[in-house]
Amino acid sequence: MKTKSKRFLNLATLCLALLGTALLMAHPVKADAMTTDVSTISGNGEGEGSEKEWWYRGYNDGYKAGEKSENREELDRDNFNNFPEDLPSDDTENQGEYMDGYGGGYEAGWRNGHRLEALLEDVLAFFTNIFYGWFGDGAKS
């Protein structure tokens, strides 16, 4: 008797799936098309007067400095004085944007200019994370 009820259950499931498919084929779901302004999506914000102009300038300046640098340096935001001359000293918002871009650009430039050191750093960090994952860092939980 169990075999017949199992067959019935499988057959009922198959019938419901086929019925659902047939209903969807007969009355497909209608979706509304949305038009979007391509210029707002594809714009990268690098233009003059853009809110990210100082970030991009900082990134480019930091990238160049990172490629030329022999030693890797951390960005000290409190003592940073490498701003361009045309960035007003009282414009703290754009100075922050510039420093954010400079830090990211410096890191990318240093990694591009010192590929072997960057690779060794990544490998060391990978194995360190595995080691701490296996054995923990000594902290009791």
Image (tube, rainbow, N blue to C red):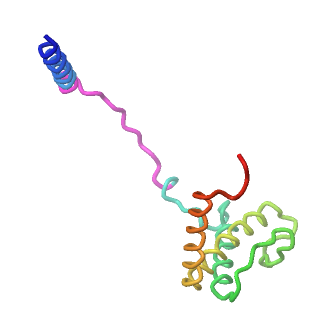
Q: Which residues are magenta?
A: 23-39
* Magenta-colored stretch includes residue 34: yes
User: Most extreme residue toward the top, as rendered?
Assistant: 1
Residue 85 spot, x, y in % from top left: 80, 79
| Image quarter in which the N terminus is found | top left
Q: Nearer the viewer, residue 62 or 70?
A: 70
Residues 33 and 14: in front is 14
Q: Looking at the magenta stretch, what is its main secondary structure?
A: loop
Residue at x 12%, y 13% (from the top left corner): 4
Question: Which is more toward the observer, 39 or 112?
Answer: 112
Q: Is residue 116 above or below residue 105?
A: below
User: How many numbered circles are shown?
Assistant: 0
* Residue 128 percent coordinates (x, y): 61, 67
Residue 55 in percent (x, y) is at: 68, 67
Find residue 119 and report its image quarter. Answer: bottom right
Q: Is residue 66 part of the magenta span, yes or no?
A: no
Q: Position of residue 32 (x, y in %)?
A: 36, 33
Out of 36 and 76, give the one closest to the viewer: 76
- Residue at the image point whose x is 59% and y is 64% from the top: 131
Q: Residue at x 41, y 39 (%)?
A: 34
Q: Is residue 40 left or right of residue 99?
A: left
Determine the residue positioned at 45% across, 53% down: 38
From the viewer's perspective, is residue 52 above or below residue 17? below
**47 on left or right of 23:** right
